[in-house]
Amino acid sequence: MAEALLETAGLSRLFGGLAAVQDVSLAVEAGVVHAVVGPNGAGKTTLINLLSGDLRPSAGSVRYKGRDITSWPAHKVAHLGIGRSYQKTNIFRDYTAFENCWLAAQARLPGAFDMLRPARRRVEARDRAAKALDLCGLADRASRRAAELSYGEQRQIEIAMLLATEPELLLLDEPLAGMGPEESAGVLALLKRLARGHTLLMIEHDMDAVFAIAQRITVMVNGRVLATGAPAEIRANAQVQEAYLGEGAA
């Protein structure tokens, strides 16, 4: 078993009397694509929000590289090397693809608000932005406004923005959502390329895509972990088949 990059223990989040996430203990191994799946309302996005610092847990802990980051705010989590995407595309539509990535890179650089070193920061941010766009196959779209690009390309810009911050761990919330087969295939190919140099924790409803890319899968139902294992183990798990796969969930 590879070294755990991110770990949770007894992680829970209550919204009034509703337990959206209940006692979740999870280990995301370094260098692995780990998918979190489950029916709507299973608590998957709430879990990602807890890991990224967008929500504070009601109980339990989160550790990154052995460091307790429980209840850290999102900007502080991001500076550790954890990048996060959202279900809905979160980009600056009136800015170019390059400008979107440049802003992301600039925000992550040390001393981002130190006005005494603007030239060095601009060059470094520019280089990171250009590299991220190239990795995502968008180098020829760099000067195009994000609003002019296809939905699939906009999702790729969002991933490029994450890469411009040079994260080690990517938290991806339904990266294939809302796409047709051709766009989905393109983004899935991108995720496979990124997996060579990053750890990915992704929520995804497209089970064909999950089984095509993930090395570990966690199934959540009603805020709890039902099962975690290799794809073959999850396919063969009778409880998973009954609670999720057997329902034909997508």
Image (cartoon, rainbow, N blue to C red):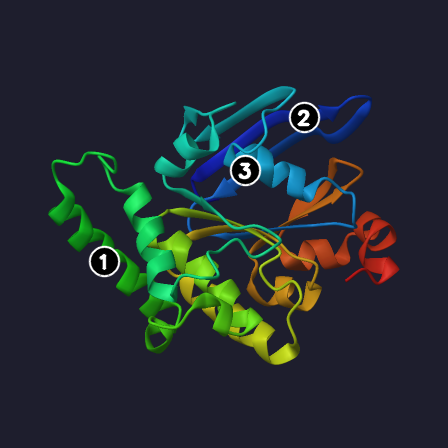
Residue 221 coordinates in the image, percent (x, y): 78, 42
Relative to 141, is 21 on the left or the right?
right
> Which residue is at the far front?
94
Q: Quadrant of residue 183?
A: bottom right
Q: Residue at x 18, y 47 (%)?
A: 121
Q: Nearer the viewer, mark 2 or mark 1?
A: 1
**218 or 177: nearer the eye?**
177
**Residue of label 3:** 27
Q: Quadrant of residue 241?
A: bottom right
Q: Nearer the viewer, mark 3 or mark 1?
A: 1
* Amino acid found under the numbered disc labelled 3: Ala
User: Circle 1 sits in a helix, a strand or a loop, which is it?
Assistant: helix
Q: Are marks 3 and 1 in contact (CB under 8 Å)?
A: no
Residue 18 coordinates in the image, percent (x, y): 81, 27
Residue 186 coordinates in the image, percent (x, y): 52, 75
**214 or 204: nearer the eye?**
204
Tell me the tag on residue 126: 1
Q: Residue at x 65, y 76 (%)?
A: 180
For disc 1, the neighbor class at 10 Å (few under 14, some 14 to 19, many from 20) is: many
Relative to 14, is 155 on the left or the right?
left
* Amino acid found under the numbered disc labelled 2: Ser
For the residues labelled 3 and 1, the Cα–Cα distance comes to 35 Å
Tell me the tag on residue 26: none
Residue 111 coordinates in the image, percent (x, y): 22, 34
Q: Nearer the viewer, mark 3 or mark 2?
A: 2
Tell me the tag on residue 12: 2
User: Circle 2 sits in a helix, a strand or a loop, which is it?
Assistant: strand
For the C terminus, give its image quadrant: bottom right
Task: Please report whichever mark, 3 or 1, sits nearer to the chain's N-terminal start.
Answer: 3
